[in-house]
Image: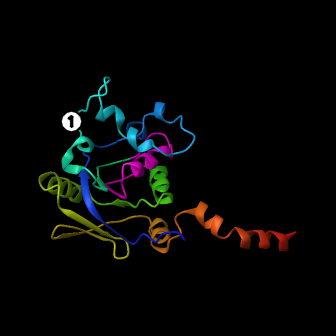
Amino acid sequence: MIKKIQQITGQAIPLKGNDIDTDRIIPARFMKCLTFDGLGQFAFYDVRFSDKGEEKDHPLNSPDYAGHSVLITNRNFGCGSSREHAPWALSGIGIKCIIAQSYAEIFANNCSSLGIPALIVDEETVTKLQNKVSAHPETEIKVNLLTGTLTLGEENFSFDMPETYRKALVEGKWDTTSMLMENLEAIKKKNQTLK
């Protein structure tokens, strides 16, 4: 049974910057795997680690954001190549939801296909959310896909996302591969009647 994704509760990571592309999310040299398992360890690798493997100053290296599951970023997130590895890498580090001003369309589609809501808010809201999370990393964020609202601490905000993505998530129809597998016998029977 595919999980219906209607509400998400967690804590957030402020990842400031525009035009964060898929090569920054998962550098190409780490995409030699046969499956997507283990990609999380390489998420944002080149901006998180030096050539010697030493940690750089990056939100994902900060203990303040350890275990946080909502990413708050800026404009045109996931631009560049259409590699599906990027949202898989984010999923691999525990990201369950992304909030940004805008996304590359294919990236947002790939996120939806993995059950990761890609919410759209305006610049003022992104700035407010990032500043609040930076000052108070422990603050809980709640996302409600049914009402189109998110709550950070005591403040409520609205968000947007394509209705087709929202509907697929809340109805549990986002994982097309699982849906095909669940309905395999019915599909086989239907194909037999068409012959």
Left or right: 37, with 96 as reference point? right
Relative height, residue 72 to residue 19 (above, below): below
The quadrant of the image that shows the N terminus is: bottom right
Any magenta on residue 106?
no
Residue 153: x percent and y percent?
A: 17, 67
- Which residue is depicted at the point 31% across and 27% down? 53
Q: Amino acid at mark 1?
A: Asp
In the picture, measured across the screen, residue 47 lies left or right of residue 37, that is left
Q: Which residues are magenta?
A: 78-103
Q: Position of residue 103 (x, y in %)?
A: 39, 51
Q: Is residue 26 above or below residue 99?
A: above
Residue that sits furthest to the top in the current view = 52
Check the picture and name the quadrant holding the C terminus. Answer: bottom right
Residue indicated by mark 1:
57
**Residue drawn at (70%, 67%), measured in percent from left and top?**
184
Instruction: Tell which of 53 and 28 is nearer to you.
Output: 53
Q: Quadrant of residue 151?
A: bottom left
Q: How is the image coloured?
A: rainbow
Is disc 1 surrounded by few (<14), some (14 to 19) or many (20+) residues within 10 Å? few
| Image location of residue 136, percent across then percent down | 13, 56
x 55%, y 44%: residue: 35
Q: Nearer the viewer, residue 37 or 123?
A: 37
- Residue placed most toward the observer, 66 or 142: 66
Kind of element beneath mark 1: loop
> Is residue 80 covered in magenta?
yes
- The residue depicted at 34 percent of the width and 60 percent of the height is 120
